[in-house]
Image (cartoon, rainbow, N blue to C red):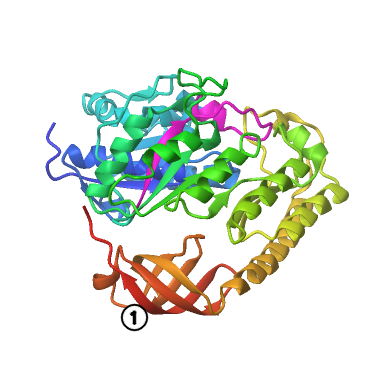
Amino acid sequence: MTTSKRRYHITTFGCQMNKADSERMAGILEDMGFDFAEDPNNADVILYNTCTIRDNAEQKVYSYLGRQAKRKHEQPDLTLVVAGCVAQQEGEALLRRVPELDLVMGPQHANRLKDLLESVFAGNQVVATEAVHIMEDITQARRDSTVTAWVNVIYGCNERCTYCVVPNVRGVEQSRTPEAIRADMEQLGQQGYKEITLLGQNIDAYGRDLPGATPEGRHLHTLTDLLYYVHDVPGIERIRFATSHPRYFTERLIKACAELPKVCEHFHIPFQSGDNELLKAMARGYTHEKYRRIIDTIRRYMPDASISADAIVGFPGETEAQFENTLKLVEDIGFDLLNTAAYSPRPGTPAALWENQLSEEVKSDRLQRLNHLVNIKAAERSQRYMGRVEEVLVEDQNSKDKTQVMGRTRGNRLTFFTGDINELKGQLVKVKITEVRAFSLTGEPIEVRQVVSV
């Protein structure tokens, strides 16, 4: 079947891992001869890369699918694909709910999209959700940015947090080799990318499934060792990593981040709750005291480091006093950014079966109160930028003001200033901050440090 003039559209829900998977699948489709369609209604292949962490994201997928399923009755050649975590969770049940679907594929099968689609084009309805070893992917991703890029370093997750469906849908931990990761980064550096975010569902666990041990008895390959190994990749100016787990976050890692100039002083470390009883019920494997020690250690090595995190309110059985422990942790630490969510029962997780579920009214009230405090603390944290000179990596034009460009500080604070995107994109600019807001800054450019692609 020829695909020379056919078009595709991908809609991505959820986390950075999903966005990275979508970029890889877009690259596969373009290698197959498909062109990208901005409007899904003009596409011949529609792919929904799904998230099952929250129920509202899952329901949105079904809403989108319903509209395209109707369209398929008028255009039988339309190919409908559901990928990602909902696909892995539901499997063949998705076909019973939406029989118009052509392909259901879990996250571990993203690299196999071409083979799976060829089976569909041969007349088959395909479900690919079996556990597999993820092979190295030689496909070129279609990147949404020409300045920043994601590089997967570990797939899957071995944690069993009682609220989380990720281990069920993304499989066990599988670390890539340091050589494969560095090769990806070297290629991106040659292509002109300036910033890399190393990605993993539980990135601090990197390497523990790889063979080898040091004379001291620790794993031969760790995230710390990986940072040292890839730090000198030519062309790459900045390195970030996410998402971290407090259970595995070490002082050795913190020390490495302080020593390596390309590693940005920004850490995303979800704490989920400030109450020890709830953390135990969540099976998180740490206490709020340990979490505080991690943050204190980061700030001892890097006093100006930005800290972001995730938190859940309304977990089953959460009392008002336990919720207030979360508020106290947020008050004491002062996060630069905190992603918040009301607990959502997910299929196949232990907590979804517990009888002590809280009402939606209680969850909504606590979420509003937490968000109010988050905004206050973020605004307070932003004040430290006023009048300072920050290095900003220019990523794109400000979509709301075409006279401005936008980029991020090393601490990941979104920053706007007047400039020509054609001249400044991909450059590091010294910017004097003149306005501060809770989650973004505005400034005046002072000096451009020309970054030449290798």
Image coordinates for residue 393, horizontal then vertical, percent: 38, 64
- Residue 8, placed above or below residue 347: below
Image coordinates for residue 400, horizontal then vertical, percent: 40, 75
Q: Residues within 10 Å of mark 1 (few under 14, many from 20)?
A: some
Q: Secondary structure at mark 1?
A: loop
**Residue furthest to the front:** 215
- Provide the residue span drawn in magenta: 148-172
Q: Residue at x 40, y 31 (%)?
A: 99
Q: Residue at x 64, y 67 (%)?
A: 381
Quarter of the figure that contains the N terminus: top left
Image coordinates for residue 91, horizontal then vertical, percent: 47, 26
Magenta stretch: residue 158 in it? yes
Magenta stretch: residue 422 in it? no
- Residue 339, placed above or below residue 107: below
Image coordinates for residue 260, horizontal then vertical, percent: 46, 48
Amino acid of disc 1: Thr
> In this image, 77 relative to 233: left or right?
left
